[in-house]
Image (tube, rainbow, N blue to C red):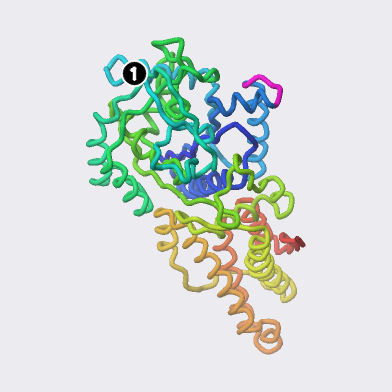
Amino acid sequence: MKYFITTPIFYANAKLHIAHVYTAVIADVLARFHRQKGDDVFFLTGMDEHGNKVYKKAQEAGKTPQDFCDQIFQATEKTWKSLGISYAKFIRTTNEEHEKGVQFILQKLYQKGNIYQKDYKGLYCEGCEKFLTRKELVDGKCPEHNQKPVLVKEKNYFFKLGDYLPAVKEKIEKRDLLIEPEARKNEVLQILSQGLEDFSVSRESVKWGITLPFDKKQTIYVWVDALANYITALGYGAKSGDQALFNKYWPADLHLVGKDILKFHAIYWPAILLALDLPLPKKIYAHGFMTISGKKMSKTVGNIIDPDSLVQKWGSDAVRYLLLSQIPLGKDGDISLEKMQARYEADLANDLGNLLQRILVMLKKYEIKPVAGSFDFDEKKFTDRMNKLEINGALEMINKLITDGNEYLEKRKPWELAKKDPRETEKVLNNLYSRLTLASSLLKPFMPKISEEISRQLKTLDPKPMFTKFIL
């Protein structure tokens, strides 16, 4: 079975922070889980490199926009590699194949009569790269970036969104397009019930972008450019006509996004796809914000945590685990280094690491050749939770498997049992060995390197510390 999963493409105005990593790690865990099931997985991520914000940042850095984007890409690639993000493709919106694909899409929409030109005046937030209505402002400012939008007057091209809103609403209500969690679906339906204006697909004042194919004086609006990546990455609109990947993997099985960009993905993007006579994605899942002291993490605001520094402190797999265990998927969650350190010591160093070392030492000491032991664990329930994106619930099941093992160890005390009942000692240690073997397999999507090392130690009975103390 095929499984096509995507992340948003991350904006190239600055180095990635931990909230971007959170999205990528969730997607990677799901991709690895489906590969483990035997599915044919295509995992797409990438970088959104056009727009005024990138252009200005490049000017500030004394670089050309392309050189600036290349620099951000190199840093992103390094971070993704260090965290084991196992994507099939990393798309850049400055790639020629993408640019041609986007132009093909806009030309097709224009020829079908879905695009028209008009004068426009509106409030534009450069941080969001989008127009805002006055009712969306808080104290006259963008609620996300805490800055006043600028009044923009331009002659742009617009997409006839209104023609497709009834169909989009029907698809959502009939669950042909799944939007999760349920609260996000209700949010989208509320927006649709209030009505939406047609949206701009071009800008005449933006210098850094893809040229509109039917009007060389305008560039394609950065959000339309970015959304198109989900199909251009599969070859849609390619000049060569090679759409084998598109025919194989589209529609997407899951668009994983942050809740702040849900409107673009759940309304604008489906409307564009309907206009192109293309199938809609099967599911859009909008996760919550990662906050620090209650405020959303943002490169523009500056309250960010560098993921590379965390990898240096705890290692890549531990960082993956800590991010996923800190925040229930779909909800907002406040994080801190102190909370992550406490979780690291409790779950990894003490529970998992301690249990593994003690069992391996005793197996070796008592010269026991381990065989499968028996214990209760509902693997079907675990799989169901992963399929439903209940990642935290799945992790809780793994943690319970381990904590129950520690409790069982303390209750049965095999170090004392060995003095009077070697056969019962063997039974107890086989039970615990089997728990760890299963835990290692279940942890593979979450912590691939640690899972592999646990498996190696279990096979060789060669205990080596995997978790070291880190003092803040």
Q: Is residue 385 above or below residue 297?
A: below
The structure residue drawn at horizontal position 61% and vertical position 25%, both measured from the top left corner, is 56
Quadrant housing the C terminus: bottom right
Q: Residue placed farthest to the front in the image? A: 139
Residue 45 visible in the displayed image: no
Query: Residue under circle 1?
Result: 118
- Going by the numbered disc 1, the residue's amino acid type is Lys
Residue 159's quadrant in the figure? top left
157 relative to 260, above or below: above
**At which x and y percent is residue 202?**
42, 21
Secondary structure of the magenta portion, mostly? loop
SS class, disc 1: strand
Please give the range of residues in magenta. Answer: 61-65
Percent x, y of residue 89 = 53, 32
Residue drawn at (44%, 61%), measured in percent from left and top?
A: 382
Where is residue 70 shown, x and y percent of the image? 65, 25
- Given the current orientation, which residue lies at the most extreme bottom position? 420
Q: Is residue 274 above or below residue 399?
A: above
Which quarter of the image is occupied by the N terminus? top left
Q: Is residue 372 left or right of residue 158?
A: right
329 w.r.t. 129: above or below: below
- Residue 80 left/right relative to 129: right
Nearest the eye: 310 or 419: 310
- The answer to whether 464 appears left or right of 273 in the picture is right
Q: Nearer the viewer, residue 20 or 411?
A: 20
Residue 390 is at least partly visible in this image: yes
Mark 1 closeness class: few <14, some 14–19, many ≥20 residues within 10 Å:
few
Residue 454 part of the magenta segment: no
- Residue at (69%, 51%) from the top-left corner? 310
